[in-house]
Amino acid sequence: MAKKVSINKLLRTDDAFLTTSEKFFLYFKQNTRKIFTILGIMVALALVGFVVKSIHDSRAAKAMDAFHQANTIGEAEARGEALRAVRENYPGTKPARQAAYALLDDYMAAADLEEALPLLDELIRTVDSSEESIRPLLVTAQAGLLEQVGQLDLALESYKTALALVDRGQVTQPEEPFLAELYSSIGRVNLALGRPDEAKKAYADLIARAPNTYRSFTAQVRLSQLEDTDGEEATPDAGAEIAPAPEGGSEGAQADSEATPTESEAAPTEAEGTETDSEATPAEAEAAPAEGEAAGGQ
């Protein structure tokens, strides 16, 4: 037997004449448990968020205090230990990041490349959106350190990476001077790697893109020197083709006589006598034939 259903429910006219407040009260009455559950979750989330924020703020404040105290230490080794402690005890905080940059400055000032290179690599890999504009500077510093330790191929790649970042507008310094430094470094490393053509291209690009810098003048000088070097290298080959070395025969003798005229003139013969005789005065030279004729007549 079918269940009877009220016509009011089928037509949904049981609340057709209720006011808005009455409808709201009715809905609240029907969904009381659900509403209180949602409100309880919201309150719990708010409390958790408040607690987390309080802990984070307290941790960040402690980290900042530790960082400032580390910076006040005058002795280099103790200062380094304090800065490393900030990084270890408060990872992920802004003071820990600042401590990393402070350590990098100390390492580079002390020329401690073994510590500076891995730290700089870490800073580049963990750059966030707020530091994206200084990424080219970090990459350039990395290239300089790689160049110092003799890893020229890696240094060249880092310089080119920094240049690409500059071309995308990610640089905080004035673009032209920074471009000039990058192109100058690329040219220098290419020369060290024995790639003069790529070096000349870098210097030419420097002059074209950063003409109002001091590096532009030095690039012109370097280009001139490279062109002169190319000319000097070509000169001996051309000379060798025009004037080959003598191989012997009459041509060899002629070359020898032309090369040492003083020796051929000064070489004494048996008829002429010794070298001392050949250097006799003109008067003695005129008297010598006369004595020979007189001897012949006798």
Image (tube, rainbow, N blue to C red):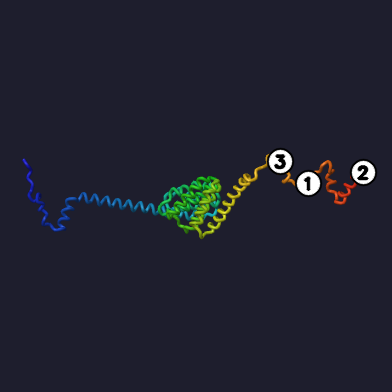
Q: Amino acid at mark 3?
A: Ser
Determine whether the residue tagged by mark 3 lies in a helix, strand or loop: helix
Residue position marked by numbered label 2 in the rendering: 297
For this view, does 68 lie left or right of residue 294? left
Whichever of labels 3 and 2 marks the residue nearer the N terminus, that label is 3
The picture places residue 28, in percent across and down from the top left corner, at 18, 53
How far apart, in angstroms, are the residues tagged by discs 2 and 1? Answer: 32 Å
**Closest to the observer: 137 or 252?**
252
* Crowd class of label 2 (few under 14; some 14 to 19; many from 20; radius 10 Å): few
Q: Amino acid at mark 2?
A: Gly
- What residue is shown at x 28% (from left), y 52% (from top)? 43
CB within 8 Å, label 3 to label 2: no
State the residue at coordinates (31%, 52%): 47
Task: Tell me the quadrant of the picture where the C terminus can be found.
Answer: top right
Spot occupied by residue 140 in the image (x, y as percentages of width and height):
49, 51
Of the numbered discs 2 and 1, the one sitting upstream in the chain is: 1
The x, y position of residue 175, in whole percent, is: 47, 57
* Cα gap from disc 3 to disc 2, whole angstroms: 42 Å
What residue did someone put label 1 on?
265
Q: Which residue is mark 3?
A: 250
| Viewer-nearest residue: 145 or 90 | 145
Quadrant in the picture for the N terminus: top left
